[in-house]
Image (cartoon, rainbow, N blue to C red):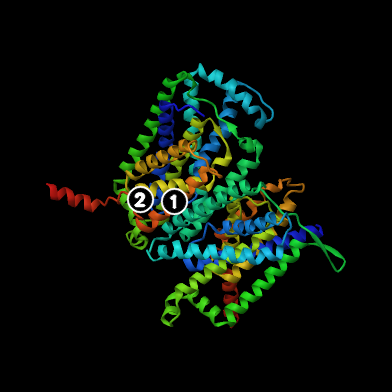
Amino acid sequence: MDFNLLIGAASYASLLSLMALGLTFTYITMKVPNFAHGDFVAIGGYVAYTLYVLDNKNAHLFLSLPLAFIITGLISYAVYISALKPLSKRNLRIADMMIAFLALEIIIRSLILIYTDVMRAATGTYFTNVMILDKNISVLGYSVPLTFISSISITIALLASLVFFLTKTKTGIALRASMENPQLASTLGINVDKYYSLAWFLAGGITGLTGPIMLSIFPLSPGVGWSYNVRIFASSVLGGLDSLSGAVVGGLIVGITEVIGSYFLSKPPFNIPSVYRVTIPFFILIATILLMPRGAITTINQYMEKRRGEKK
Amino acid sequence: MMTFDLPRFLIDALMISCIYIVLSTSLNLEYGYAGIPNIGKVLFLATGSFMVAALSIRITAHLLGLSYGDYSIESRILVTRINEVLDKDPLLSISLFALLTAIAVASSVAMAFALSYPTVRLRETYLGVTLLVAGEILRYIGRYNENFIGGTLGSPVIDVFGWMGVGLGRDILVLLVYLGIAISCWLIIKRMLSSPYGRLLRAIRDDEEASLSLGKDVNKIRVYALALGSALAGLAGAMYAFYVGHIDSGDFTPDKTFLVFLMIIIGGKANPHGPLIGSLFYVIVERTIRQAKYLFKAPFDINYLAMLILGLVLMMFMLFRPTGLLNERNDLENLHRKLKKA
């Protein structure tokens, strides 16, 4: 196993954990998985790629990241305000909400497709199946890809600030309260609607942030959302669907297993081509549902509590 | 510019409607009546189509004693040779059609059992996510495995209607066969759903606990409803494969699932006539857009705009009229109306 593989696995897994974290925010508020979540990654990616093309192919990673955060966050916020808030007031069944999310995914993806077609006609450059080449920078004498540095540092910084925000600031505590128990929160005078829209903004932003970095890992196409959805859902189910810390851990496990697993499976004795790597998250998903449907984190917590109880 | 051929256009639209009627009838059973959000509908359609595409040439080549090397390359040559034989052999064509359709239906049902068994006991979110993800995985395998259905090139399907001749006469005959299948499926399901079975499905949809307290095995009923729906979806997949004559895994995206849901929601959930109206509505809209594409120019593909509009239409229906155009026909209400008349 070589150094590059580990680096690739680490940066991929940390980005996946951010995407799963975003999905969990939206899942807790709506109780339905957001099928358009993978498209948020594509939106973030296209924000960065548009900047890249408009500025004569100079990659401005540090300029495109905040922009991707804000634009994707605003789109996600607009989606919540315009469609999901009125829908959730209608007391639809979960099955019906899933259909609405399916429609939402179609709307967002069609808009991305139209955008890329228009931009290709306007700029004369390809907008589908694009990548931005990764640069290497030297750290302490080692040549390290920029993707690795940026993904790891952004994940750590974002998680640290989220933990601070959710546990120490008043807004963050109110947000957590309205996500965990909306009825109780509203009796205490918290405007739950306002915090739900904040949750959607954050969810979109965090997910959109991964798009620009993903541009140097996977080729970006307008229809790329579904291949991300497979991985995000697997991570999120592994983490327990409604646990924020579980989503981060789930994303890390799924990402690392996918990269390292596909590496080992492509070697003899298996010789499975690495294009099938997307099946690894699928098997993790099925195994989680069969063995511990409430997610790995919840199951481990329950086990620990049981043991603690036995000791007493 | 293509010349517009009206009879051909109508026949094509009706053929596609037949396939969608079978597909949306199955979804109406699962989602409208039993309340199962089968957002992996395309998985079962794809299972049917892929089985026909993968096996039609292989089985016929085996029967006729033709040998071949690399499937993805030689399937195109094989299919012309096979079709020449089948054109003169109606009996073989019909039995192949029946056999392959049976295989498609059986594998679709097997898929439904395998995937619903672990997930049906959990929240419906898990079932939905599993089916959806499984559909995507099947599409990936179809796309990247060249020995399955020819990878990105796709795989041709044998022509089992070749013996009916050529031209308009053949098209009308094939259309009659498809109409027969679609209408009999629709009638059987309609009959089933207006029997106590339909009431049972609606009961588990509306109140799971109450049905449990009456001694109904809710999970088992759900699995069987899903299996029945998947049998129809597999049949629709086989019909699609035989009609189009070429299967490419790229057609089986989650968009297909969305379209079938669109038909059900527009037509009306849990109304036996919903699938008919929904399918016809969609096919008319889709074909009109296809023709309108030649009329005006835009800097983007009109199909994307069409999908955008269809997505907005479904969203509007969910927001303002979640029951669809036709309301759910309630047995009690019907009885009441009948008594009033009498």
Upstream in the sequence, badge 2 or badge 1?
1
Question: In the rendering, at what x and y percent does residue A29 appear?
Answer: 49, 68
The answer to whether A45 is drawn above or below residue A139 in the figure is above
Q: CA distance from mark 2 to mark 1?
A: 20 Å
Kindly give the residue lying farthest to the top in the view shown. Answer: B88
Q: Residue at x 44, y 31 (%)?
A: B12
Residue type highlighted by circle 2: Lys
Q: How many marks?
A: 2
Q: Residue at x 69, y 65 (%)?
A: A63
- Binning the other alpha carbons within 10 Å of mark 1 as few (below 14), some (14 to 19) or many (20 upward) gives many
Question: In the rendering, at what x and y percent does residue A208 appear?
Answer: 61, 62
Observer-nearest of A33 and B192:
A33
Instruction: From the image, tell me which residue sits under label 2.
Output: B269
- Binning the other alpha carbons within 10 Å of mark 2 as few (below 14), some (14 to 19) or many (20 upward) gives many
- Residues behind callouts 2 and 1 on a single chain: yes
Question: In the rendering, at what x and y percent does residue B42 appear?
Answer: 50, 45
- Say which chain tag 2 marks: B
Q: Quadrant of the N terminus of chain A?
A: bottom right
Task: Identify the element where label 2 is drawn.
Answer: loop
Observer-nearest of B85 and A67:
A67
Give the quarter of the image for residue B82: top right
Question: In the rendering, at what x and y percent does residue B250 appear?
Answer: 58, 41
Observer-nearest of A228 and A309:
A228
Residue type highlighted by circle 1: Val
Q: Residue at x 55, y 78 (%)?
A: A172
Q: Quadrant of the C terminus of chain A?
A: bottom right
**Mark on residue B223?**
1
Q: Inspect this view and state whether residue A293 appears.
A: no
- Say which chain tag 1 marks: B
Q: Is residue B281 left or right of residue A116?
A: left
Q: Pointer 2 and pointer 1: residues touching (CB < 8 Å)?
A: no
